[in-house]
Image (cartoon, grey):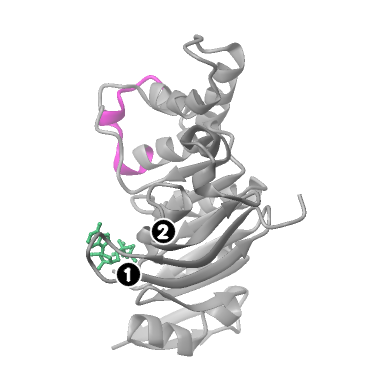
Amino acid sequence: MTGPILEARNLCWGPPRRPDILTDISFAMAEGEVMAICGANGAGKSSLLRLLYRYVPPRSGTVSLMGRDLWLHTARETARTVAAVLQEQPTDFALTARQIVALGRLPHRAGFASAALRDTEVVSAALERLDLARFADMPFGTLSGGEKQRVMVARALAQEPRVLILDEPTNHLDIRHQLELLALLRGLGLTVICTLHDLTLAAQFADRVLVLADGRVLSDGPPDLALSEHHIATAFNVTARVDRSGPAPRFSFHL
Ligand SMILES: Nc1ncnc2c1ncn2[C@@H]1O[C@H](COP(=O)(O)OP(=O)(O)OP(=O)(O)O)[C@@H](O)[C@H]1O
């Protein structure tokens, strides 16, 4: 396809009877692009993601998926194209990791047909990719925080989406699994939108960084431009230094 796969146009949103929390947010994602969303606590990152995966409609403005308003797609159609990995996790702790990952196949199932062979294969492949094969048949509730997080990413991959939206996916992950997850996300060839608190990871991993401040786009562009000392200082209310002399930028912050 030639146009953007996902486009936000002049999005505004706020909770019912409250002022806007997100104001006039616009950006377009080309297929395969990887974008990190950064910003201070309360800047509106999770709220923006909720508009993008069709959980809440914007107050004004539109989100288009493959050129069509997201709210003209059914929830099921959207789920075949867009998968989300959120901070909240399932509470059905008795399900095994494999059963949770298999939930990702639901949008692709016709009626109540039992799981097809292909579903089983896709689920096993997703478990393998997230290094979860040995946990596959364990109850989700017994897994560590990081293992649970990887199960949620595997579930999203089992959905075979074209757009993957992740809210702080590196939370709970040790350093190796953080790097592995971000390398995996980059290597999928999917359109990825991901909130990240770690600016070093954002700069290493994303083609593009969108910095939100007080619900508005403060900067949007390649990491070197979007994560300038000035933008970081404004967004986080700190003094920032960025050392770009090495292979990856090094950030330091002071009050
Ligand atoms: N449904 C809601 N009702 C009332 N206030 C809300 C609602 N959703 C979000 N907010 C408020 O909107 C602001 C933005 O919240 P949001 O969770 O989007 O921030 P965030 O950038 O993801 O923050 P964090 O980095 O802490 O996760 C916060 O002040 C939050 O309290």
Q: Is residue 138 magenta?
A: yes
Displayed quadrant of residue 100: top left
Mark 2 vs mark 1: give the one in front: 2
Label 2 or label 1, whichever comes before in sequence order: 1
* Residue that label 2 marks: 58
The amino acid on which the numbered mark 2 sits, given as a three-letter code, is Pro
* Residue that label 1 marks: 21
Measured along the vertical axis of the image, is residue 189 above or below residue 196? Answer: above
Boundaries of the magenta span: 136-147
Q: Nearer the viewer, residue 3 or 189?
A: 3
Q: Is residue 135 magenta?
A: no
Displayed quadrant of residue 30: bottom right
Residue furthest left in the image: 17
Q: Is residue 90 left or right of residue 217?
A: left
Measured along the vertical axis of the image, is residue 205 above or below residue 242? Answer: above
Q: Quadrant of ligand 1?
A: bottom left
Displayed quadrant of residue 77: top right
The crowding category of the residue bearing disc 1, from other C-alpha atoms within 10 Å (few below 14, some 14 to 19, many at least 20), is some
